[in-house]
Image (cartoon, rainbow, N blue to C red):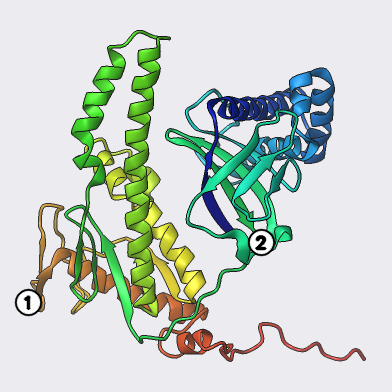
């Protein structure tokens, strides 16, 4: 599945119509959630049927077509199923579904009806009951390379700097690359974004820290305005656009760096960090958030599937304490940045030593699981061949 995004160019009246559609979508989602709370034991199909009842009782809800209303019910059901799954797994925070309130961002999703693309694929026309009209698509992606039946959904997203249309295409993305024979281990950190097993380090850009002064100034201006005034709305818009810029900087850095790492390696090993638990540390939470380790890992795994590169997440326990030369444990605090082994006399940078341990664990893990062998099976898979392996199930004995 590919997602192409383009900005919608229209008038203020058209944007107000899109806001009405987004508010109606939020209303249907919250109503389905309330219906689930009041009637225990109902499922996904009952929520979809309840959308027709809402369309009859509320005329503004009928402006959305049936597929768009069902997509709103699917959002409510996804929150419910996530709560059920966490309850079965005995997760501490199960995430009970909550009602959505008005926010700067929001979206409305169309499946196969409610919109129409022009012949030149440069304009989209919304044909639902809100009659938002035609919008010019402004972006770098060209939809001429894909058929109309490949567009499964169109999602209109509202952000701080405008409205965007996301096209979900039913296309499998596979790209070819030449094997490099390089295996790499990555150790993420604060002083350097990561240090690999070869000793190379990438500097941490610290986008949030660099924008912290301007964010503080905009936040102070917003707090000094009167609630409900136009100046407050303008201040909120400026602050939201600044936060949006920082988030885009994080994403751009993670995407480009992850693609570069995947294209230059045949196996990438990294730590399986629980970032959600790590941000609970008050002293390090802002630095962890600014580093965006989770986004970098997600893009590593995505590009690994696209380019056919093995990505292995290893447990992070004692990767910094163990000696990568002799394997002995050398206890050190976070302030100690140099690894000095008393057993073999090996001296190395702390992060470099950890990256070497991560690579060793990654190669060991891949070899034991049998998914892909780091030495030879990678080349076979990249070349389009399937590694030979024994069948997991033996032949049945003939009945007597």
Q: What residue is drawn where x is 38% and y is 67%?
A: 259
Q: Nearer the viewer, residue 389 or 232?
A: 232
Which of discs 2 and 1 lies nearer the camera? The answer is: 2
Report the side of 106 relative to 350 (left or right). Answer: right
Can residue 120 be seen here?
yes
Can you say which quadrant of the picture contains the N terminus?
A: bottom right
Indicate the position of residue 135 as horizontal and vertical percent values.
59, 40
Indicate the position of residue 159 as horizontal and vertical percent values.
47, 35
Can you say which quadrant of the picture contains the C terminus?
A: bottom right
Q: CA distance from mark 2 to mark 1?
A: 56 Å
Q: Nearer the viewer, residue 237 or 55?
A: 237
Crowdedness near tag 2: few (<14), some (14–19) or many (≥20) residues, C-alpha within 10 Å: some
Report the side of 258 relative to 11 (left or right). Answer: left
Q: Earlier in the sequence, mark 2 or mark 1?
A: 2
Report the number of discs. 2
Q: What residue is drawn where x is 40% and y is 9%?
A: 229
Q: Which residue is mark 2?
A: 170
Q: What residue is drawn where x is 36% and y is 34%?
A: 241
Indicate the position of residue 224 as horizontal and vertical percent values.
27, 12
Indicate the position of residue 28 as horizontal and vertical percent values.
70, 27
Crowdedness near tag 1: few (<14), some (14–19) or many (≥20) residues, C-alpha within 10 Å: few
Q: Which residue is mark 1?
A: 345
Residue lying farthest to the right in this orientation: 400
Q: Quadrant of residue 318?
A: bottom left
Q: Quadrant of residue 136?
A: top right
Q: Which mark is residue 114?
A: none
Report the side of 332 relative to 169 (left or right). Answer: left
- Secondary structure, mark 1, is loop
Q: Quadrant of residue 43?
A: top right
- Secondary structure, mark 2, is loop
């Amino acid at each position: 599945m590919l997602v192409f995004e383009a900005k919608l160019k229209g008038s203020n009246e058209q944007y107000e119509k899109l806001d009405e559609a987004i508010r109606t979508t939020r209303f249907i989602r919250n109503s389905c959630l309330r219906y689930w709370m009041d009637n225990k034991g109902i499922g996904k199909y009952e929520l979809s049927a309840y959308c027709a009842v809402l369309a009859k009782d509320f005329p503004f809800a009928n402006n959305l077509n049936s597929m768009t209303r069902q997509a709103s019910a699917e959002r409510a059901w996804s929150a419910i199923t996530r709560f059920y799954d966490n309850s079965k797994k005995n997760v501490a925070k199960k995430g009970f579904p909550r009602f959505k309130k008005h926010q700067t961002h929001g979206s409305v999703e169309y499946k196969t009806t409610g919109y129409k693309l022009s012949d030149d694929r440069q304009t989209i026309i919304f044909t639902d009951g809100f009659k938002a009209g035609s919008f010019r698509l402004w972006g770098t992606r060209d939809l001429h390379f894909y058929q109309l039946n490949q567009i499964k959904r169109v999602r209109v997203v509202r952000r701080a700097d405008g409205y965007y249309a996301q096209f979900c295409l039913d296309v499998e993305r596979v790209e070819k690359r030449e094997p490099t024979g390089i295996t790499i281990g990555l150790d993420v950190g604060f002083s350097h974004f990561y240090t690999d097993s070869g000793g190379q380090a990438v500097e941490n850009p610290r986008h949030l820290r660099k924008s912290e002064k301007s964010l503080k100034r905009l936040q102070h201006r917003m707090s000094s305005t009167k609630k409900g005034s136009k100046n407050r709305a303008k201040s909120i818009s400026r602050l939201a656009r600044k936060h949006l810029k920082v988030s885009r900087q994080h994403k751009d850095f993670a995407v480009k760096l992850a693609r570069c790492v995947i294209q230059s390696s045949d196996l990438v090993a990294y730590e399986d960090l629980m970032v959600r638990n790590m941000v609970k540390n008050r002293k390090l939470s802002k630095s962890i958030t600014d580093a965006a380790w989770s986004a970098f890992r997600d893009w590593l795994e995505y590009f690994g599937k696209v380019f056919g590169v093995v990505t292995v997440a290893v447990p992070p326990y004692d990767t910094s304490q163990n000696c990568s030369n002799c394997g002995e444990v050398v206890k050190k605090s976070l302030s100690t940045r140099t690894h000095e082994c008393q057993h073999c006399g090996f001296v190395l940078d702390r992060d470099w030593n950890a990256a070497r341990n991560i690579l060793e664990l990654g190669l060991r893990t891949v070899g034991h699981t049998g998914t892909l062998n780091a030495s030879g099976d990678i080349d076979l898979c990249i070349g389009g061949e399937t590694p030979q392996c024994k069948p997991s199930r033996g032949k049945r004995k003939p009945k007597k």
